[in-house]
Image (cartoon, grey):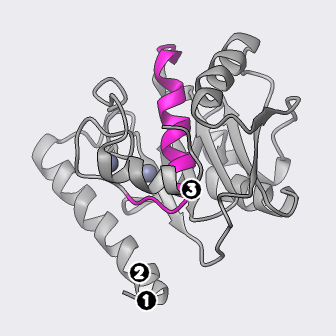
């Protein structure tokens, strides 16, 4: 299928999937959680790229930065940890006092150096237009494929031990992985829930794709 076609079809699929979830479980009043990817037509050579983890905002703790960085470095040895920077004001969404993830990854994709992938991490709330909602609270968003992704620990409500799984999921999108039907795979779609507790590893299919892209799995 051509990229152009996917751009139009994917949002439609998102609306249908969310409608089914809401009808079945009536979770629309609970805090919505999702891991989302945006189709971006640019291709990044993921074997030769450098990866930089960029902490955003002043609420993320040193402990969470360090732990997340160490967990990701095991499988992506070429990753480096940058100094934390302020959230860019352009991404602020006043009605909900949170930050637009789509604006954040667009901003990061513009400040990334050639051949670099920027992996944003934050403890502040992020949102995007997703699942039929104008402003939907999410855990992460990444280009697929592309040079930027963002993950937020806000919706883990203090259970930060699984935050690295959100980060690895969004990083997987940046090297082209789509959502995976295997429930224990890191690339599983969240579909309105926090599924990180059930995610154990990349399934074989996702793993093979990542190994081809230089990941040490
Ligand atoms: Zn995703
Ligand atoms: Zn998988």
Frontmost residue, 122 versus 186: 186
User: Residue at 28% of width from left, 27% of height from top?
Assistant: 198
Q: In this view, does 116 lie to the left or right of 192?
A: right
Residue bearing the label numbered 2: 6
Residue bearing the label numbered 3: 213
Query: In what quadrant of the picture does the N terminus appear?
Result: bottom left
The percent coordinates of residue 54 (x first, y second) are 78, 37
- Callouts 3 and 1 close, C-beta under 8 Å: no
Is 190 drawn above or below residue 143 in the view shown? above
Q: Distance between the residues labelled 3 and 1?
A: 22 Å
Residue bearing the label numbered 1: 2
User: Residue at 52% of width from left, 26% of height from top?
Assistant: 163
User: Residue at 49% of width from left, 58% of height from top?
Assistant: 37
The percent coordinates of residue 162 (x first, y second) are 46, 22
In this rendering, the label closer to the viewer, 3 or 2: 3
Is 40 drawn above or below residue 114 in the view shown? below
Could you say whether the residue bearing mark 1 is in a helix, strand or loop?
loop
């Amino acid at each position: 299928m051509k990229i152009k076609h996917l751009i139009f079809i994917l949002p439609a699929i998102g609306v249908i999937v969310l409608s089914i979830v809401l009808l079945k479980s009536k979770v629309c009043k609970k805090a919505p959680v999702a891991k989302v990817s945006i189709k971006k037509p640019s291709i990044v050579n993921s074997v030769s790229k450098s990866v930089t983890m960029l902490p955003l905002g002043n609420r993320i703790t040193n402990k969470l930065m360090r732990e997340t960085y160490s967990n990701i470095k095991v499988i992506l040895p070429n990753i480096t940890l940058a100094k934390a920077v302020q959230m860019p004001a352009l991404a602020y969404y006043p009605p909900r006092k949170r930050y637009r993830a789509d604006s954040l990854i667009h901003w990061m994709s513009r400040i990334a150096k050639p051949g670099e992938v920027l992996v944003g991490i934050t403890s502040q709330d992020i949102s995007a237009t997703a699942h039929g909602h104008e402003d939907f609270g999410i855990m992460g968003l990444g280009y697929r494929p592309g040079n930027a992704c963002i993950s937020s620990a806000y919706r883990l409500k203090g259970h930060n031990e699984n935050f690295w799984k959100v980060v690895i999921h969004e990083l997987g999108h940046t090297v082209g992985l789509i959502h995976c039907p295997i429930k224990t795979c890191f690339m599983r779609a969240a579909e309105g829930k926090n599924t990180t507790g059930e995610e154990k590893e990349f399934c074989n299919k996702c793993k093979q794709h990542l190994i081809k892209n230089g990941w040490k799995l």
